[in-house]
Image (tube, rainbow, N blue to C red):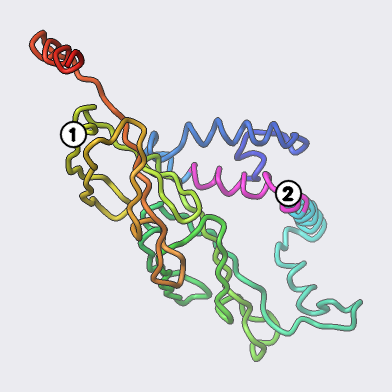
């Protein structure tokens, strides 16, 4: 299925139409709302990643057009263009292809996996390649594993291509990433905010306990250093920024009278 069919738009659709279709479908099939839609959501994200970028869309359209030509004109031999490239390479520039083709993989991970890092095994060319990705993976980040791609189709003595992995992080509603800082919100009774207390808040790898200072107020933001998003390949992290939201439970007459006394004193 083409990327256009995945998003349910025509190949002549405008950028606005593509973006609108993506927003509608991603909300409908997001794993948080539709547990059975994870695979469909992945395909939708892949389609928009390509069609939502003008340069990628142009390259995709050109590739699709070439594929239709070769498939229709040469009995469906999908690898004919690859073979031509490997035999002749950039012949018009006086160069030939000196290695196999790159193998590209889109890896979809949760926000928690991006935070903690993940070990992944890829099955390629009849074998397996295991990779340990460190904490701090970012959406759109690319990794190149040299020599782990396709072998040369005509001369196996030449080096393999590379394995190129593109990271796609599925957003999580509980967290908003801003640089290396992670925003979270916590709702609790207004008197707990005013009087101060200890609370437990959710971060990507579990819960932590923080202290609300006495005299705080609704809307106040608490900063917890070195608990935010990791910087890939380092020991450093951003901060957790916790915004305090007040809830206002219903009070009985005695409680209301007590508040009035405090107000009048």
User: In the rendering, at what x and y percent does residue 45 appear?
Assistant: 55, 46
Tell me the magenta residue range: 40-58
Q: Residue at x 23, y 42 (%)?
A: 212
Relative to 46, say whether 225 is above or below: below
The part of the image, by quadrant, that contains residue 59 is: bottom right
Query: Is the N terminus in the top left, top right, bottom left or bottom right quadrant?
Result: top right
User: In the rendering, at what x and y percent does residue 243 appear?
Assistant: 35, 38
Is 211 in front, or is 133?
211
Is 75 in front, or is 240?
240
Q: Residue at x 65, y 45 (%)?
A: 2
Calculate the distance from the C-alpha at mark 2 to the C-alpha at mark 1: 56 Å
Determine whether, in the image, residue 51 is placed left or right of residue 94.
left
Is 65 in front, or is 197?
197
Furthest-front residue in this view: 265
Residue that numbered label 2 is attached to: 57
Furthest-right residue in this view: 92
Tag 1 or tag 2, which sits nearer the N-term? Answer: 2
What crowding class fits label 1: few (fewer than 14 Cα within 10 Å), some (14-19), or many (20 or more)? few
Furthest-bottom residue in this view: 157
User: In the rendering, at what x and y percent does residue 206 appear?
Assistant: 25, 53
Mark sitting on residue 195: 1
Give the secondary structure at mark 1: helix
Query: Is the C terminus in the top left, top right, bottom left or bottom right quadrant?
Result: top left
Magenta region's main secondary structure? Answer: helix
User: In the rendering, at what x and y percent does residue 105 appear?
Assistant: 55, 63
Q: Is residue 145 magenta?
A: no
Q: Residue at x 50, y 47 (%)?
A: 42
What crowding class fits label 2: few (fewer than 14 Cα within 10 Å), some (14-19), or many (20 or more)? some
Furthest-top residue in this view: 253
Determine whether, in the image, residue 70 is placed left or right of residue 47.
right
Is 132 in front, or is 221?
221
């Amino acid at each position: 299925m083409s990327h256009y069919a995945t998003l349910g738009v025509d190949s002549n659709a405008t950028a606005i139409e593509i973006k609108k279709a993506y927003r509608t479908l991603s909300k409908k099939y997001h794993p948080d709302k539709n547990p059975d839609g994870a695979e469909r959501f992945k395909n939708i994200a892949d389609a928009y990643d390509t069609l939502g970028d003008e340069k990628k869309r142009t390259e995709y359209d050109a590739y699709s057009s070439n594929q239709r030509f070769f498939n229709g004109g040469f009995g469906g031999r999908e690898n004919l263009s690859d073979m031509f490239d490997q035999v002749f390479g950039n012949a018009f520039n006086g160069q030939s292809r000196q290695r196999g083709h790159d193998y590209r993989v889109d890896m979809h991970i949760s926000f928690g996996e991006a935070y903690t890092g993940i070990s992944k095994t890829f099955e390629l060319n009849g074998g397996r390649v295991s990779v340990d990705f460190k904490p701090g993976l970012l959406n759109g980040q690319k990794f190149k594993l040299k020599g782990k791609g396709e072998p040369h189709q005509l001369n196996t003595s030449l080096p393999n291509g590379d394995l190129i992995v593109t990271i796609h992080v599925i957003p999580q509603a509980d967290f908003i990433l801003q640089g290396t800082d992670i925003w979270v919100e916590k709702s609790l009774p207004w008197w707990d905010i005013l009087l101060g207390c200890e609370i437990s808040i959710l971060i990507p790898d579990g819960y932590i306990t923080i202290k609300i200072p006495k005299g705080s107020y609704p809307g106040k933001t608490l900063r917890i250093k070195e608990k935010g998003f990791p910087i890939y390949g380092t020991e450093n992290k951003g901060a957790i920024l916790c915004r305090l939201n007040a809830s206002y439970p219903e009070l009985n007459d005695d409680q209301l009278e007590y508040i009035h006394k405090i107000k009048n004193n």
